[in-house]
Image (tube, rainbow, N blue to C red):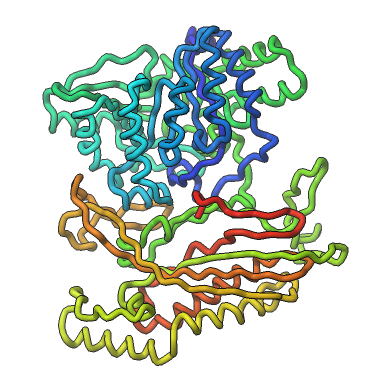
Amino acid sequence: MDAYNRQHNYLRISLTERCNLRCFYCMPSEGIELSLPEHLLSDDEVIRLATLFVKSGVSKIRLTGGEPTVRKGIVEIVGRLNELRKYGLQSIGMTSNGIALPRKLPALVQNGLTHLNISLDTLDPFKFEIMTRRMGHDAVLRSLRASLATPELQSVKLNVVVIKGLNDHEVLDFIEMTKDSRLSVRFIEFMPFTGNKWDKAKMVPSSELLSRIQARYPALRKGSDELNDTARSYVIPGYRGSFGFISSMSDHFCGSCNRLRLTADGQIKVCLFDAKEVSLRDEMRRGASDDVLLRTIGRAVSGKKEKHAGMEDIDVVTNRPMILIGDVHRPVSARSIQRSPRSRSEYTRNYIPRAHAARSLAVRRFSTAPTGHGGTPSARLTHIDDAGRASMVDVSPKEPTRRTATASGRIIVPRVAYELVTDGTQEADHGHLADDAEMAALLRAKERARSKGNVLVVAQLAAIMGCKRTSELIPLCHPLPISHVSVTLQPEAHHTNVGVHSRSASDAPTVAIDSFAVHTRSDIGLGEASQEPTYSIVCRATVSCEGKTGVEMEALTAVSVGLLTVWDMLKAVAGKEMVIGEILVERKTGGKSGDFERSSADQ
């Protein structure tokens, strides 16, 4: 109990800082620096702390992240938590984005999971890729269907973060999902956290949403709220499910707050919006007894404020980004940069598959780095000396080993360019051309592009040449004896299901995400779908050598030069519409840092 007589019986445990989505309101566009694995709580430490909390009166535990399903051993952790029922634990919940949930759900439920919240902010798969910077809309819907079909789950809720001008027009569509299912939809006000570019103008107050819903469903009535529930619930007569609002900004519920948070790195956080934290991990690893830990927890709870600051005064500078749930904000390092999508033209705003153009990737530092005491990686840049001057790394003491690296990248192209490189014969189907003169101009542009030669062959040769000249292009790269370079360029067509009514792109509303503009489809109809093919060319380069340092830079240079050459070859027909992106290292072998392969979730 705290100084305001609030009994805390609800513990939220973050199991990981990692996530397989990159939601812009949760993940800062510049990225986050993840904790080292040894700094995170082990399974045994999680269970020890959970046991102390339950014995002290906690009856409800919810597992969060990051994304909890990416934590190894999540099923076993739920099973071990289930054993705490003998001490008074009544429910085990989890909040998930649903991407990796379907295959784990049966085992989780069998081991004791009782409550599930799934996060889904839009019913439009195209917009989903904009908001999350990933594909996976279908996977989330599969998780939702599977959850609703699992009677052992006592409740299934859908969390929807509402942002003005982006998805607030979908509220009524979400309401309709409660008509024939036991689903509870909860609309959450857009909240400020470090790096999410929160703007009061983007927040839709719950009272405004309720007015819109009442205009459509005048017979709706107030539902029965659970004690300490954060959501104000409502039901529509004849509907099986319910909906509610979590009004953290416009109508906070601090007076009845019963929540404590345990971060993945072992900090107790008594308020989501308070940057103050106390490390239980450090206490445990110093050998603290259970009594010492309980006193530490008690002091933290007794210091909880009566309420969080107003929306204009919340500390988003020292408080964690949402994905870290409370970590002291640390400077961004090279290995943690997350790329954000860019939109440059009407074509890219409307037709780039966002899983390709907006893929945000945690970039690992592949080069060998010095270590500090105990093997902890140093934060010092290896190419800068103590005086801040550029300095080439000395690799002379190292022994040569076999090293390989594979990199890839993508250039988004319009249909006319795709047909050029695939020898397409569908010129007669360009319905967007106004007249014969425009068609003739297009054909002349095609001929100019073809006059340069085979686009993909020229780009392949350019990529190989660029690879061999890497040390001349990148100032501090070592010249390496390249053994082999393999380059492929593969045209791809993508088909995205987007339900839309007939409408021109210029009529679509424009919203800002991460300071760039995209068009959204405000008239998306559920159940309607059309195929909108989009086109790209993927360049992939694999480089090998016997050397003292890795060939990642050579592979990346090959891909970059190859894609730039494609641009040059096609600019006569597509110069204003192409976008280059997603240049990344897929895998590497050899060297002190060992082998690496990027997970499929990050590709």
Looking at the image, which residue is at 41% across and 35% down?
191
* Residue 322 seen: no
Horizontal side of 324 relative to 219 (left or right) equals: right
Residues 582 and 404: in front is 404
Quarter where residue 427 is shown? bottom left
Work out whether 491 lies above or below 329: below
Q: Position of residue 500 (x, y in %)?
A: 20, 54
Looking at the image, which residue is at 32% across and 38% down?
162
Q: Position of residue 385 (x, y in %)?
A: 79, 60
Looking at the image, which residue is at 31% across and 43% down?
122
Quarter where residue 109 is shown? top left
* Residue 518 seen: yes
Work out whether 210 lies above or below 194: above
Residues 30 and 138: in front is 138
Quarter where residue 571 is shown? bottom left
Q: Position of residue 5 (x, y in %)?
A: 49, 7
